[in-house]
Image (tube, grey):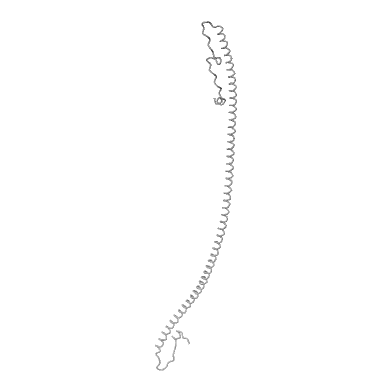
Amino acid sequence: MKYSPLDIAHQTFRGRLLGYDKAAVHTFLNEAGSQLEDLLREAQHQQETVARLEQELTEKRAAEDELRRAIVSAERIAHEMRDNAVRESELLVTQAQAQAGELRREQEVRAAQFEAEHQERVTALEIAFRERFAALEREENERARQREREHAERTAHLEAQYSARALELATRNTAARQEYAQFISGYRALVGSFADLSRRHRLPDETPPLDLDLSSPAGEESAPPPEGPREQAQA
């Protein structure tokens, strides 16, 4: 049977001879009931505290479970994120490698095109240079031939002038010789006539007539030889 503090405080006993002091017993019972009430109150408080602590522990355990689940979920998410990051990084690396390969191929194609264009331009420049050089060479040859033609024409013209001048000088020389021969013939005839007249009309005391050289007139210099055609042309 359980006793409450009130039961202990109001507990009555049957009296007997030479029994306990009722006042002392009631005092003790009151004190015991009060102490029991305090103990019960403290026990109740402790039970409430224990219940509260158990509730808090349950809540903390629930929170811990939730936290554990959150940690597990976070770890899973972290693993997933890491795996996704690895996959994305691998994908980015693959894409970068593909883009690098594409850029390298494009660069190679552009380099080949540039080299081909450069070669074509060099070839075109070489062809243009050769054509220009050939044209200049043809022009120089044409100028040389023109100079040769002009020189030949001038030489022919000078030779024609020389021939005409030589012919003219030869003609004049021939005419001069003929004129000179006629003059000598006339002079000789005149001298012969003068000698005859002198012999016919010579006085006794006169000196004999001079012996004149009829081959050339007196005081007359011999005619110089005609100049050559080349010297006349140079004059």
Quadrant housing residue 144: top right
Residue 105, given in percent of the width and then of the height, sits at: 57, 56
User: Which residue is at the front of the view, 86 or 66?
Assistant: 86
Quadrant housing residue 180: top right
Q: Is residue 10 above or below residue 52?
A: below
User: Which residue is at the front of the view, 182 or 40?
Assistant: 182
Q: Is residue 63 above or below residue 10?
A: above
Residue 184, given in percent of the width and then of the height, sits at: 57, 16
Residue 195, given in percent of the width and then of the height, sits at: 56, 10
Going by the picture, which residue comes out furthest to the top?
204
User: Which residue is at the front of the view, 188 or 106?
Assistant: 188
Going by the picture, which residue comes out furthest to the bottom?
17
Report how many numbered discs are placed on residues in the image.
0
User: Which residue is at the front of the view, 141 or 10?
Assistant: 141
Q: Is residue 227 above or below residue 201?
A: below
Residue 66, given in percent of the width and then of the height, sits at: 52, 72
Quadrant housing residue 212: top right
Q: Quadrant of the C terminus?
A: top right
Q: Is residue 144 above or below residue 18?
A: above
